[in-house]
Image (cartoon, rainbow, N blue to C red):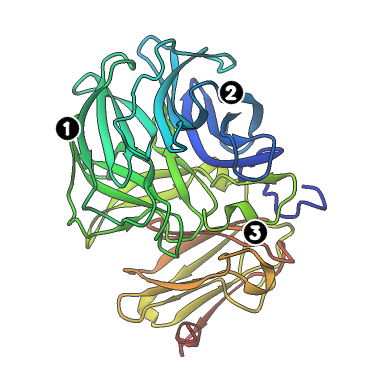
Amino acid sequence: MTSDEPFRPRLHFTAKAGWINDPNGLIKIDDEWHLFYQHEPHSTVHGPMHWGHASSHDLVHWNEHPVALYPDALGTCFSGSAVETQSGDIKLLYTAHRTDDQGQDLQVQCLVHADRQLTSFERESSNPIVTNPGLAAFRDPKVFWHGPTRRWIMVLTHGQSVGIRSSSDLVDWRFESEFGASEGRHGEGPWECPDLFQLRTTNGVSRWVLMVGIGTDGPGGGSGTQYFVGEFDGRRFINENAPDVVLWADLGRDYYAAQSFSGASETVTIAWVSNWQYANQTPTREFRGVMSLPRELTLVRMQEGLRLRQRIAPTVAAAFEIVRSGENPTSGTYCLLTQYDPGATKVMSVTLFDEPTPIVTITPLGEGKVRIRTLRESVGQISQFAHDYAVDVVLSGPINIEIFVDNGIVEFGVGGVLWLTNLHFPPKPAGRVEVTFDDEGSPYRAIA
């Protein structure tokens, strides 16, 4: 970290230079984790999309590689995925995006053949492999092998729903079904970056999880990542919750486009830490855009049904300095550990960065509420960045709380089932931290 980049994190991946957003093509090959990502290497604002590429052996230390995919005659390179075939070949699938003669978006799906070292990339001669049926938003193919039906499955944005297709060879694709037009949360923009994977609980119950980004109307406004739990038979996904039940992978403002790694024995996800309301304005110089810490996912049965449980990958968690309330961290990268007991009927407030205002308060009033803030005085003129909102939560405890802080990035975990990820740009990234408990509950009642 240089003196003019106080907000470059140590343990969250950033590109050395340029813009990044959605993670793409996450795949584990042998013992190496590969992260591709939306990248504009020539600017720190969103522009013509390339695929950047980085790799790691431990999810902590990342090596940045040359740009993998460049725009071509079919368009720029939007989001997608990577898979390994039964013969050991590596394939990338992505959305090519351009504007047509009438100035309208045209998005089609393309295939790329890569070597096993992911150093050479050759586009399929028959691209596009999936043409556009007339949708303005038709993008972000996530592909995986479905063993029971012995076919490749693709989930793909269809505006505000997810299309499901199948193929035996990754080239010829058949439409199977569509999900979500009347389920979950819908905003003004399209759903994006769908992902479909199978998870188990500790007692062996198996379900499928469909995760999808929503560009507007997230928990705190703007971007968010929701998920559905249900069954998948190779053709249709069936939601086991009522259509109006909305489940969030993260209740913060800055957790979007989460994707899982193909080829890993455990389900590990990475997301983009930002929000489209202000992503182009954040106060960094040489780079803009950050990836979340890798999270391992399982399912846990709660009173209201099966829900995601997420934990920071153990190798990553171990790389953080551990601090406790009242301490001054030695750097801006640390993990604050504490515990909260809703049965104590106290409000818990968490203050970071030597600031007087808490960034999170938790109250057990009713079933429980969490109030989330940014540091208003520290964000300058970033449009729509400052926020102060509350969400209803179900709390039972005592609950272990882990707060991972990395030069202003905060990933706040409550028992693994509630996560709050938010960007902050404080004057003192390594400032004093404090956890307090208040019988009166005044921090919550002060909501404007």
Between 409 and 268, the one lying in front of the other is 409
Report helix, strand or loop for mark 3.
loop
Give the label, 2 or 3, closer to the camera.
2
Between 59 and 277, the one lying in front of the other is 277
Decide: is 29 above or below 160. above
Name the N-terminal-most of marks 2 and 3: 2
- For residue 169, what is the image quadrant? top left
Decide: is 275 above or below 110. below
The residue at the point 34 percent across, 24 percent down is 131
Between 158 and 257, the one lying in front of the other is 158
- For residue 201, what is the image quadrant? top left
Decide: is 151 above or below 249. above
Give the residue pinned by disc 1.
Answer: 233
Report helix, strand or loop for mark 1.
loop
In percent of width and height, residue 431 lies at 71, 67
Give the residue pinned by disc 3.
Answer: 408
Report the amino acid beneath label 2. Answer: Ala
> Is residue 197 visible in the rendered structure shown here?
yes
Which residue lies most toward the front here? 102
In percent of width and height, residue 116 lies at 51, 14
Tell me, yes or no, whether the two marked residues, 3 and 1, touch with CB atoms within 8 Å.
Answer: no
Give the label, 1 or 2, closer to the camera.
2
The residue at the point 74 percent across, 65 percent down is 428
The residue at the point 52 percent across, 21 percent down is 73
The residue at the point 58 percent across, 35 percent down is 48
Give the residue pinned by disc 2.
Answer: 68
Q: Could you give the CA–CA distance between mark 1 and mark 2, rounded to whole angstroms?
A: 34 Å
